[in-house]
Amino acid sequence: MSVTEWGILLTVLAALGAASLWRLGEMVVPDMDEGVYVYAGKLIAEGSRPYRDFMLAHPPLVPYLAAAAWVLGGGSLDFTRLFAVAVTLASCIPLYLLARRIAATAASGFLAVCIYLVGLVWIANLGRTIRLEPIQNELLIGGAAAWMLGTRRRSAFVAGLLLAAAVSAKLTSVVPIGLLAIAELAWPSGGRADGERRRTLVLGAVLLLGPLTAWCVAQDGFIEWVFRAQVGRPRETLAERSAAFFLAVARFPVLLPGFLLAAWQLRAPDPRRRTLAVVALGSSVAAVLIFHTFFRHYLALALPWLAILMGAWGASLRGGRTPRWLVPAAVAAAFLSPIGFTELSFRLAPEHSSGAATVLPHLRAGRGYLLTSAPDFALVSGRTLLPWYFTVDNYLGRVTGRLTDAEFASAVSRAGTVVLYRGEAGRLPLTRALLAERFRQLPVDPHWEAWEAVPAASR
């Protein structure tokens, strides 16, 4: 790549990053997950340890990255979001390099980047807040690029480190990694078997995963919540999975031709395209049908590989002479995508922004600990979450039966303010009775329910 091409790529990424920040600060609760990981990072920065001091249902990498962002940003939620956008943009560089190498044209790289970023936003508003999947993908893409584009042992060692780090971000990384390994054995990326590089890759992975696994297993609660509780979640029906899948396709219709292209690329003469097709299709099947639960953001696991294949295919149109308008149109679409998504969210899903904002004045005027299913409320308002084992995440405990209604009600009794999703307390009769007896309900947006503790003398 020339200096000019690097300059164009970085300029485009900077512009797309600026667009990703559009009115992001007005989003109080952008999604269900951001607050969990950022508040976990806040607790870690204050000296707490995950699994031992508070429940965490995933490997530790993302909360520790959140802790670093929280400290570097001086305890700013906006800074953690800027950090998340930077992580997403960084993942686009190896994505670009992979697509460019496969199709031998810069256009394929730009198309892949644009498809990937637009898909992240429209599938589940990913890439703009600290969540598992964008960080997981950055490491997977980086590992795949280091292996497929490199020829020396050094690149293999880096690939091993990055792929192992992806597992430490989210355990589902083992699916694309396993598929990459199977495809590599069947169709070596360099055109021939390279046993020395493979051994070096494994060495890099073991050097990271070995000590990390030992540390995790030594933490009380790690096995219980990262493995047993996840397996104990109610398994979703095929109808529920199908509904979530088709919603993802409806939100980002490019997925459908992407899957068809991946199936077609299984017979491509280039082994790298066949490898990416296997990873894309296999990850999708695992996410939709095999994982215990399926949410549409799980399809992010397949998105980078689909984006690379579609970018390479798009650049090969007209015999490799890409239409001049195609790349500028893709960049424009990627620039407008987060802006359009945000504006639609304000109008169609106000519970994330203006609706959630109706809770904030009560939180800022209230006293005592806050108990909520959406820790973003604490981060935005400056309130402190109730210190108990389920401080950052009480949802998994409740859906698996490990956190009973009586235990939840006991926690509620120690809170000054309670904020739940609409109807959430209706499934907890003891909690509902306690709220009616000792709390007064606050006037907030109907998507949320909030209560403030009433002093004993005033009841």
Image: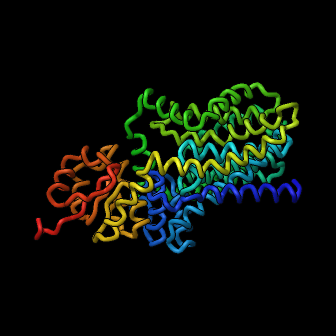
Q: Would you identify the image quadrant in which residue 174 lies?
A: top right
Query: Which of the two residues, 181 or 199, is positioned nearer the viewer here?
Result: 181
Report the side of 159 relative to 70 (left or right): right
Residue at figure coordinates x 64%, y 52% from the top left: 206
Query: Which of the two residues, 23 or 290, is positioned nearer the viewer here?
Result: 23
Residue at figure coordinates x 18%, y 50% from the top left: 430
Report the side of 98 relative to 442 (left or right): right
Residue 306 appearing in the image: yes
Residue 214 versus residue 424 in the image, above or below:
below
Q: Would you identify the image quadrant in which residue 386 lies?
A: bottom left
Image position, residue 136 (x, y; %): 60, 50
Residue 161 appearing in the image: no
Report the side of 195 relative to 15 (left or right): right
Query: Which of the two residues, 45 or 366, is positioned nearer the viewer here?
Result: 366
Residue 371 versus residue 197 in the image, above or below:
below
Residue 356 versus residue 277 in the image, above or below:
below
Residue at figure coordinates x 39%, y 56% from the top left: 356
- Circle count: 0
Image position, residue 413 (x, y; %): 21, 61
Image position, residue 232 (x, y; %): 38, 40
Image position, residue 292 (x, y; %): 45, 36
The structure's colour scheme is rainbow
Q: Residue furthest bottom?
A: 74
Report the side of 222 relative to 135 (left or right): left
Quarter placement of the C terminus: bottom left
Residue at figure coordinates x 83%, y 46% from the top left: 106
